[in-house]
Amino acid sequence: MPTLLALGAHYDDCVFGVPGLLLQAVRKNYRVVIGAIIGDYTNWPPVEGREPELLETSRALAKSYGVEMRFLTAASMQFEVTEERKREVAQLVVDVKPDVAVMLWPHDRHPDHEVGARLSKIALHGANRILDAPGWRPPRRIYQYDNGPGHTIGFEPDTFVDVSDEWEQANEWLGKLMAFVRNQPYDPSRPDGAQEAKRVLAEYRGKTCGARYAEAMKAMRAEPRDIL
């Protein structure tokens, strides 16, 4: 069974950025793992007093769609590219052993996204040297994904994934997660702002490549591909 690892800074980065890709990988019998570098939400007001529930709900929702979710220990605005953090992210990468990985685009208005992307890039490329794990090999393909126009800066994708068949589930997953954060029941007839932003973005990416809904990525490495 091949493995896809999706790395983000926050609980929702991958669920907003690449939910269709994750669900498509599940359908194609991949083992799919989300790694969120931030696992301490005690300084985030929207879930004050519900911090453990955010982790439990995120894991449970991911599991219901066939995805494993793991949280590391950082707190928002309180982590940098230190030796400790590099080792923590590298350990996750070594444990999961991804064949394919996706990570945040590094140029972003949110400092957590920028630091998270740097840590992800270091771990995905050099986990074996960080942890002295000689048997580990980097993923055969690494892609960067954007986190929407409110965050991402200067993103020019070169890879598109048609997620039209996965769209309804992807939209539902994001909506349920956002409903928990708002501390309200999920109502599919009243889309959250994040759902609306994702819909517009997915439609735009779809127009770019001729699909109804699509997710866009930038390949980490230029490589030849068979097109005929």
Image: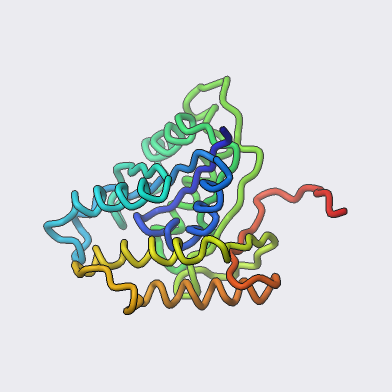
Q: How many marks?
A: 0
Q: Residue at x 51, y 52 (%)?
A: 22
Classify residue 55 as left or right of residue 33.
left
* Residue 137, image quadrant: top right
Of residues 102 and 86, which is closer to you in this image? 102
Viewer-proximal residue among 41 and 18:
18
Q: Which residue is drawn at the image coordinates 66% and 38% (left, top)?
A: 140
Q: Is residue 101 above or below residue 95?
A: below
Where does the N terminus fall, quadrant-wise?
top right
Query: Furthest-left residue in view?
Result: 49
Q: Give the x, y percent position of residue 171.
A: 43, 67
What colouring method underlies this structural image?
A: rainbow
Is residue 54 shown left or right of residue 49?
right
Across and down, in percent, residue 110 comes to 41, 65
The vertical placement of 154 against 158, above or below, is: below
Q: x and y percent of residue 118 in the render? A: 50, 50
Q: Nearer the viewer, residue 175 or 100?
A: 175
Above or below — where is 138 with respect to 6?
Answer: above
Question: Residue 102, image x and y in percent?
Answer: 55, 50
**In the figure, is residue 179 to the left or right of 29?**
left
Q: Which residue sits furthest right?
A: 228
Identify whether 47 is placed above or below 133.
Answer: below
Q: Is residue 176 rendered to the left or right of residue 211? A: left
**Residue occupying the point 28% across, 51% down:** 75
